[in-house]
Image (tube, grey):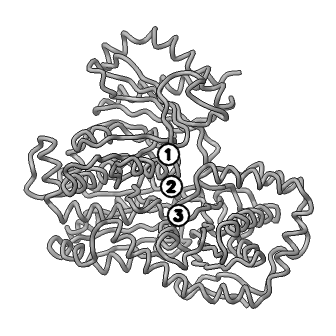
Amino acid sequence: MLIYDSRTRLPIADNEIDPFAGQMPTVTEIQKSLDSMILSASGWRKVFAISKDEEDFTPVIAQSDAILIAYAALILSSYIKEHSKEPSVLIGIDARPTGPIIAEMAIRMFLSQKIQVHYLFIAAAPEIMADNLRNSEGGDAFFYISASHNPVGHNGIKFGAKGGVFNGTITSVFADKLRTMVKDKRNIDLVQELSASVTDEQMLQVLLDVDVQKTRALKYYQDFVLETGSTTLEELKNAIVANPLGIVAEFNGSARCNSIDIPFLKKISVVLNTLNDKPGEIVHAIVPEGGNLELCRKTVESKHKENTIFNFGYVPDNDGDRGNIVVMDNILRKAVILEAQEVFALVTMVTLSEMRLKNPDARLAIAVNGPTSLRIDRIAEVFDCKVFRSEVGEANVVELAQKLRDEGYLVKILGEGSNGGNITYPAKVRDPMNTIVTLLKLLGKSELYTYWCRQNKQDVPRKVTIGAALRSLPVFTTTGAFSAEGKMQVHQEPGKLKSNYEKLFLLQWEERKEYLRQQFGLYGYVVYQTEGINCLTGMGEKFRHAPYKGGFKICFTDKYDMECAFMWMRPSGTEPVFRVLVDSEGESQVRHDYLLSWHRSLIEQADKP
């Protein structure tokens, strides 16, 4: 019997159809499927659409990919049973077409292992993680089916427990187990047997329970957003009533359509205008960067003309853990799309203002990834807050922040400025709702912005606006993480590439250093290499370890020996690209472009056989 979701009216699954019945793929076919899968702590991802077209909206996947899902579920099952006497798992999907069938296959494997399944169907990543963290019925671990910001034909899995994804140590073990399982033909037959052992009644119970599980998760998530924001519904509502606000939410068919956003914002009296607010209603590229926010930008402008209370909007990615912002700039008299680094900097400023006001003598710290802009360092200096950097990857930043707390630091704000969004403790995942709550506090609590301005020796404006707050931040020119200039294709393995790059850089630095000093004020440099939660200072192989996939950054210093620009690079852990980024203090596009051109040229030369 085909069961439908009561909220979205979308089909969940048919409990009487076994997706593993029929002809099974060969070991060779499964190995080929695995070869195209990226395995990282951030998630396991690949193109699951059966056509292998990453923009395909088909809900159908290949049986070889189905076996990989089954193996992944069995691997997590083993982990859960090792750590719990009454094992349970929390499962959710984002709004991609392939999500339901992948979830159905995973559910069958968990049930076959006598693991209790709590299924949320379409749920935002922060929602499932909040439920897992705060609720005793939220599963011993979660199995979240998503490819985050990747194109619609992609999908994948995020594994985690206690509200956050597993670190690289655990996921590396999982990946090794997967590679081993793929080689054994007996595992193919095992999957088919296990799936057949699950009764129609067992599946039906899980599917009929979705509404109850979802209702519970939404409650815990809303409470958690308020806890994370150190605020209440009443406090937020009072601020909005005093200063009416309209928000444009362009959901792009994401999982956030089926989360707390709409009811939450309406509860606090925000006037809300929603676009593409049905799950799966994906109308443009998923990553919330640049031109993908143009529809939201135009809508903010048009709504502002109708009613001046409409001052900003947001667009999430498909799993809803990222959401970048559009704001109405009253001086420019137009809506502008904020860069991911700007959003993170703005939230950092507000949060550190609040933390320092509440904790005047505390040891404040912030944990960020390697390519996060140096503007964060400038903001942190104002609050006597130390900045620590990890390798790219949410799990790395979260783990680093906890290490700092264990050492006595107060760490409330953390995140990956290069990727957008913020993580606000006790959350362990980025969440656009946390960003929005922080912006509402900026507008509703004038003392936070006043404190920033006075500490930063700036004039305090009569009225606090997001535009004014942005203009008060340190100015940096930064490569967009998802821009065309921010990615490359390379062929050398990372260790060899970095060694070649270092040799070339040393030679070319000697040739260019006088020009760099005279034209751009760059007097020296420091090299940083990040792996996991560690950031090592120094050039050469002794500052990195196999497989050499960590971040590499050359940070330039000015005549006062202050870091003022950097060139960064790293192979992506979730996409088949090599990411590059330049961050440069000031408005000089010329300096940024010169460094980026040089950086890309060095990589191209280093990549030659």
| Foreground of the two, 344 or 339 | 344
Q: Regarding mark 3 in the picture, which secondary structure is present there? A: loop
| Foreground of the two, 426 or 106 | 426
| Foreground of the two, 408 or 369 | 408
Q: Label 2 is placed on what type of residue?
A: Val
Residue 243: give x, y in percent of width and height. 16, 70
* Dot label at residue 316: none
Q: Which residue is mark 1?
A: 482
* Dot label at residue 287: 2
Q: Label 3 is placed on what type of residue?
A: Asn
Place residue 201 in its image quadrant.
bottom right
* Dot label at residue 318: 3
Mark 1–mark 2 CB contact (< 8 Å): yes
Residue at image location 46% in from the left, 8% down from the top: 511
- Label 3 Cα neighbours within 10 Å, binned few <14 / some 14-19 / many ≥20: many
- Label 1 Cα neighbours within 10 Å, binned few <14 / some 14-19 / many ≥20: some
Which label's residue is closer to the chain start, 2 or 3?
A: 2
Which label's residue is closer to the chain start, 1 or 2?
A: 2
Residue at image location 9% in from the left, 45% down from the top: 459
Quadrant where the C terminus is found in the figure: top right
Disc 2 to disc 3, how far (Cα)? 8 Å
Count of numbered badges drawn on the protein: 3
Place residue 447 in its image quadrant.
bottom left
Q: Regarding mark 1 in the picture, which secondary structure is present there? A: loop
